[in-house]
Amino acid sequence: MPRPLASPGRALRDAWRRLSPLPGGRTLFSLGLGRVVPYSGSIGARVEALEPGYARVTLRERRAVRNHLRSVHAVALVNVLELASGLAMLAGLPDALRAIVLHLEVDFVKKARGVLTAECRCVPPHAPEEQEVWLEPVVTDAAGDVVARGRVRWLVRPVEPAHA
């Protein structure tokens, strides 16, 4: 009989726990995440820290994510904000819950250049009921200046039981 798949949160936590301490492990984790979530992987972000309710992701400015103004494209910033919020949320969810984005809004504060860091902190829900949770990830530049602020509304609900 096939073993049931781990919940997304457990799979993230397990992979991070196994890979992050190894030399090059964070890079391997980030590449693997990009294969599982190809659109988010397209920006080449790197997960630097991950724990239940917290994620820190870096994005290096390079031609592939640049706009015509020689700064990081708005959509790449949205992508890294959503990625940080999703990692923080999912890494903290118990096996019985899943989450999906319902709404996302972003304020672009200044041109994004250089190495950027997206961070998100939250208290993931544990009650086995449907609920909406707002997260507020932020992207800063190397000087610590905020370049973008997001608000992401997640729908969290119990996993539907598998049918026989």
Image: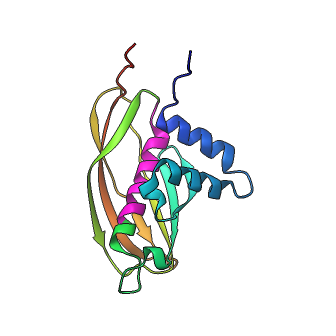
Q: Start and end of the magenta stretch?
A: 78-94
State the residue at coordinates (34%, 66%). 149
Q: Is residue 85 magenta?
A: yes
On screen, 90 above or below 3? below
Please state which of residues 24 and 106 is positioned toward the viewer in this rendering.
24
Query: Majority secondary structure of the magenta segment?
Result: helix
Q: Residue at x 28, y 69 (%)?
A: 107
- 85 over 62 or under it: above or below: above
Q: Is residue 35 magenta?
A: no
> Which residue is the extreme one toward the right?
23
- Please state the horizontal and vertical placement of residue 30, each as a whole percent of the image: 57, 55
Q: Quarter-wise, where is residue 47 in the image?
A: bottom right
Nearer to us in this view, 65 or 139: 65
Q: Position of residue 94 (x, y in %)?
A: 46, 31
Total labels: the figure holds 0
Is residue 120 in sight in this rendering? no
Q: Residue furthest front?
A: 1
Measured as percent of width and height from the top left, residue 26 is found at: 64, 56
**In the image, residue 98 lies at what x, y percent?**
38, 35
Examine the image and state in which quarter residue 90 appears: top left
Quadrant in which the N terminus is drawn: top right
Q: Residue at x 41, y 77 (%)?
A: 72
Reply above or below: 24 against 74.
above
Q: Using the image, determine if residue 16 lies above or below residue 146.
A: above
Left or right of residue 35, residue 21 in this image: right
